Image: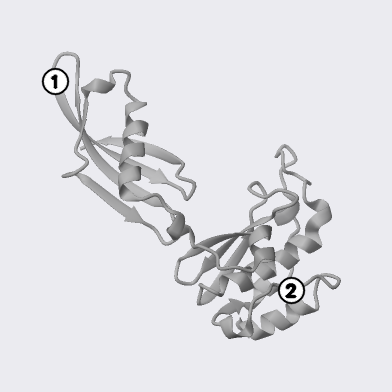
Amino acid sequence: MRKWIYAAALLILSGCGGGEEAPKIATSQAVGVIDDWIMEDYPDNSIIIGSDKSDSTYGKYKDLIPRVNQEKNKAAILATKKCAHVVSVLFMRRESSLDNLRFMVDCESGERYEITSNDISGGGTVRANSEKAIGKLDAIERCKVLVTNHYPNKQLLSFREVLDSNYHLAPNGNVRLLLGFQETSAAGLKSDWRAACIFDTDWKGEVVIKSD
């Protein structure tokens, strides 16, 4: 069967983890479905342990494999408060800590949630990445900083943030901002450029600049 209804998933979890308490989620909030493979343990423990021995997180969670698999399931269930259909749950090894694991939960709609052990123990409503995304005005200001860092003579840049900017928020919470600007050389020559700034949900950004 391709899908597990929420109630079935919750029943399975209640028998897992050596008596650990299942997420405090009321049956009345069981509005979603979860793909059945998600409720099984990860088939490859390298997802948890890592595969690159040079990675600083390699082997960090080797003693937490049962806990990671259990909290993966609980994260999926918690996400169904907002997500109509959970299609993927990925353990975020590098973003996790020993006392606060982190999971990336994807919905069929394209919405993405990052759910932690603290979220699970709290049992509250989680926020989608799109709700944490940088807004247009902040994206413009940060994009201008990223652009000016490419030019030593910052006063020779003129940005067209009102007439030549385009803001796009993706369902996973990432933002793409296009921003036009003009560069004036020391000799007075003008050239037009367009910056494409990408921001993640932590508002960290990168920029690609091309001629307009």
Comparing labels 2 and 1, the label whose residue is closer to the camera = 2
**Residue hosting label 1:** 189
| Residue type marked 1 | Leu
| Residue type marked 2 | Ala
Q: Earlier in the sequence, mark 2 or mark 1?
A: 2
Asked if 105 appears above or below 100 in the picture, the reply is below
Category of crowding for the residue at label 1, using alpha-carbon neighbours closer than 10 angstroms: few (below 14), some (14–19), many (at least 20): few
Viewer-nearest residue: 80 or 184: 80
Counting every numbered tag in the picture gives 2
Outermost top residue? 187
Q: Are marks 2 and 1 in contact (CB under 8 Å)?
A: no
Q: Which mark is residue 41?
A: none
Residue pictured at 84% horizontal, 73% vertical: 19
Residue pictured at 71% horizontal, 48% vertical: 97
Q: Position of residue 94 (x, y in %)?
A: 65, 46
**Residue hosting label 2:** 22
Viewer-nearest residue: 24 or 68: 24
Category of crowding for the residue at label 2, using alpha-carbon neighbours closer than 10 angstroms: few (below 14), some (14–19), many (at least 20): many
SS class, disc 2: loop
